[in-house]
């Protein structure tokens, strides 16, 4: 079985092409019409329905050769393409433009605005105007060439600078880059510290202090604790009591709890024993806990009381 997709067919040795009947050529055969699959080379808008068709949309189009004088440009054949709108189905046509290496919209649609086309047209207009100026003016041509050479020198200088910069960066390793970053951070910290100190000094200088006699100095916590410690450390001086009935060692606001027991009159010796001395001793002991050396005064009072009872 022969292959189906071969390009060359087998012709027997006794093949005679004159035997093949001639086919009548149609209009399409004269225009060399072919069905091709193509992508839209530009964005267009349908004139019938206003639908926008973006660049790169695929179509099954019909291609034919343009006939007549417009069919060729400098011996290059111009082709026309027929395709349909994706919304309304109306027929749209465009043809090649070998002069500008582009395509030209012909019927049924309009080409959308493209800014780079205006830039190219402006450039072409400038070149044409410059050519016309230089035709009969040698000084103008010399001036234009001088400007062009200066522009080229500037471009070469910029390229050399970029090459040297790239070469310098190529020698920098990762460790060097990290080290430079750390140094930059340290410099920024130092600058921020200096800036803060300057701001603090400016703030202190901006404050207006009053007179010395109007300033009230508040004590700190440490100063509040020191006087209380000093008060605890100071001991009261010992109080000297007189045994001759003086009440200097006894607190006058505190009464001595003295107990008495009444008995019938007896001899003077019995009267002295009748007085309960322990109660007076207990009271003297309490006063001794409050202040040192206060017991002598209590005994002196007991002795005076006994003498008064006689």
Image (tube, grey):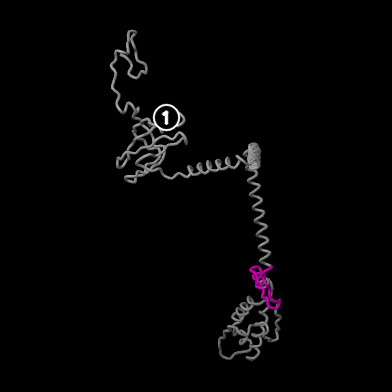
| 215 falls in the magenta region | yes
**Residue appearing at x 45%, y 36% in the figure:** 102
Q: Residue furthest top?
A: 14
The image position of residue 226, as x and y in percent, is 67, 70
**Residue appearing at x 65%, y 48% in the figure:** 184
The image position of residue 76, as x and y in percent, is 44, 29
Task: Establish if 108 lies above or below 255.
Answer: above
The image position of residue 142, as x and y in percent, is 65, 40
Q: In which image quadrant can residue 203 be found?
A: bottom right
| 227 falls in the magenta region | yes
Quadrant of image for the C terminus? bottom right
Task: Establish if 189 lies above or below 207.
Answer: above
Say whether residue 17 is left or right of residue 219.
Answer: left
- Can residue 109 be spotted in the picture? yes
Magenta-colored span: 205-228
Toward the viewer: 117 or 253? 117
Toward the viewer: 188 or 157? 157
């Amino acid at each position: 079985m022969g292959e189906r997709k071969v390009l060359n067919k087998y012709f027997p040795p006794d093949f005679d092409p004159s035997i093949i009947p001639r086919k009548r050529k149609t209009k399409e055969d004269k225009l060399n019409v072919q069905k091709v699959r193509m992508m839209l080379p530009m964005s267009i808008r349908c004139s019938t329905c206003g639908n926008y068709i973006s660049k790169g949309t695929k179509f099954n189009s019909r291609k034919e050769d343009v006939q007549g004088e417009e069919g060729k440009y400098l011996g290059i054949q111009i082709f026309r393409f027929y395709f349909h709108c994706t919304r309304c189905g109306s027929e749209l046509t465009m043809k090649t433009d070998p002069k500008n290496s582009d395509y030209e919209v012909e019927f049924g649609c309009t080409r959308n605005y493209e800014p780079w086309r205006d830039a190219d047209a402006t450039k072409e207009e400038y070149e044409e105007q410059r050519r016309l100026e230089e035709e009969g003016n040698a000084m103008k041509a010399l001036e234009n060439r001088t400007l062009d050479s200066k522009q080229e020198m500037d471009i070469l200088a910029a390229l050399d600078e970029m090459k040297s910069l790239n070469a310098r960066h190529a020698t920098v390793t990762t460790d060097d880059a990290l080290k430079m970053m750390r140094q930059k951070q340290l410099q920024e910290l130092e600058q921020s510290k200096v800036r803060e100190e300057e701001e603090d000094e400016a703030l202190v200088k901006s404050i207006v202090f009053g007179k010395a006699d109007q300033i009230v100095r508040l004590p700190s916590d440490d100063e509040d604790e020191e006087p209380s410690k000093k008060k605890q450390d100071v001991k009261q001086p010992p109080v000297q009591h007189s045994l001759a009935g003086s009440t200097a060692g006894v607190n006058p606001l505190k009464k001595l709890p003295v107990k008495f027991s009444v008995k019938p009159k007896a001899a003077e010796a019995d009267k002295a024993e009748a007085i309960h001395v322990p109660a007076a001793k207990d009271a003297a002991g309490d006063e001794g806990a409050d202040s040192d050396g206060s017991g002598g005064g209590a005994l002196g009072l007991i002795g005076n009381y006994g003498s008064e009872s006689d």
